[in-house]
Structure formats: C-alpha cells, structure tokens
Amino acid sequence: MAGQRHNIGFMALDVIATRHGFSPWRRRFKGLTAEGTVGGEKILGLKPLTYMNSSGESVQEAAAFFKLPPDAIVAFHDELDLAPGKMRVKKGGGAAGHNGLRSMDRMLGTPNYWRVRLGIGHPGTKERVLGHVLGNFTADDKPWLIALLDAVADEAALLAAGRMEDFMSKVALHTQDVR
C-alpha cells in the first residue's frame, strides 16, 4: 500500500517532514500529524487515515481546530492527467474524479484550497485506471519519483511562502532532465 501511486501525496509529505525536521507523526484528527517549520512558516502535515472517500473529514477537523481558512490548506495528490514526474499547483477547481478531493470539497464547503498535483501518468484507457492508481511504483519509476519528491521538499519554503509560480518553476528545473 505504501508504494502505491495513489500515495504519492503522503510520500511528498514524508520527504518534506524529514527534510525539514518535523516532529514525529502522531494520531490526531482521524489521521497522522507532524508539525514543523518550513521557510519560517509553521506547518502542520496531515495524512488522513480515513478511507480516501472520507479524507475530507480529517482535513475539516484539523482546519476547524486551527481555524484555518481553505486557502491556507495545501493538498498533495496524485494526478492522472499529468505525465509521470510533472507537477502543477492550482487553487480551487473540480475534483476530476479524485475521491479525496471530492471529500475535501464537501467537508470544507468549498474547493478553494491549494492543490499540488503530482503526475503519475495515465495508463491509456479508462478500464486500466484503477489498477494503475492502486498499483505500486516500479523500478523504472524510481528516478523520476525520487527527483520529484526531493525537488518538492527542497523548494517547500517557496510553497509555504505562497510563491506558487516560483515553487512550480524551481521544481520543474530540478526535474527537467530526469526520465
């Protein structure tokens, strides 16, 4: 389960937490949380432990406790519509069939939070999507996966500062020659 493409968002959080010296993960808000500082900004990492279809419950509980507005939330998630190793950041938008995002939209009452879309590529046909998303990364995926996760962690201070365009540009520079 840990190596599934669907878990690339959790993988990104793990690398950020490790690289920036976050506290150990602990159970809270129907998930696992770790706290730390990135670029001078206090950050709470949250990995919901609910089913994906209900992950918004965990996010909503944490947001309510810390009185966070939706635009202070950044969701890291897998993205079928981006090539493997590519990344985009956007605010708001539709769930595009992603049940975790759909749950967050419902529980937060708005889709107006930030999304770090981590490309896992599309398998080609609709019938193969579920197996692809729930399948593990392969040895061939490791170079781009490691480069992407490292770049996201290396440039996380730009994300924490709200400099989304700079964050995307720097991550793209780090990963341009991989694959």
Image (tube, grey):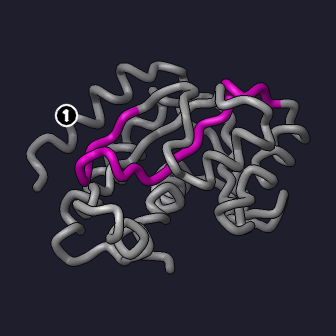
**Residue 70 magenta:** yes
**Residue 108 magenta:** no
Q: Nearer the viewer, residue 42 or 5?
A: 5
Image position of 88 (left or right of 38): left
Looking at the image, is 93 positioned above or below residue 131? Answer: above
Q: Quadrant of the C terminus?
A: bottom left
Toward which corner of the image does residue 5 lie, by quadrant?
Answer: bottom left
Q: Nearer the viewer, residue 23 or 110?
A: 110
Q: Position of residue 31 (x, y in %)?
A: 75, 63
Looking at the image, is 10 positioned above or below residue 173? Answer: below
**Residue drawn 79% across the image and 54% down it:** 58
Tag 1: amino acid: Leu
Disc 1 designates what residue?
173
**Residue drawn 34% across the image and 29% down it:** 168
**Residue drawn 43% across the image and 42% down it:** 117
Residue closest to the far right: 65
Toward which corner of the image does residue 70 lie, by quadrant?
Answer: top right
Image position of 121 (left or right of 35): left
Q: Position of residue 134 (x, y in %)?
A: 44, 73
Toward which corner of the image does residue 8 lie, by quadrant?
Answer: bottom left
Looking at the image, is 61 positioned above or below residue 163? Answer: below
Q: Which residues are magenta?
A: 68-88
Q: Position of residue 77 (x, y in %)?
A: 49, 50
Q: Residues within 10 Å of mark 1 (few under 14, many from 20)?
A: few
Q: Position of residue 147 (x, y in %)?
A: 25, 53
SS assignment at label 1: helix
Q: How many numbered discs sit on the rendered protein?
A: 1
**Residue drawn 53% across the image and 21% down it:** 162
Q: Nearer the viewer, residue 115 or 12?
A: 115
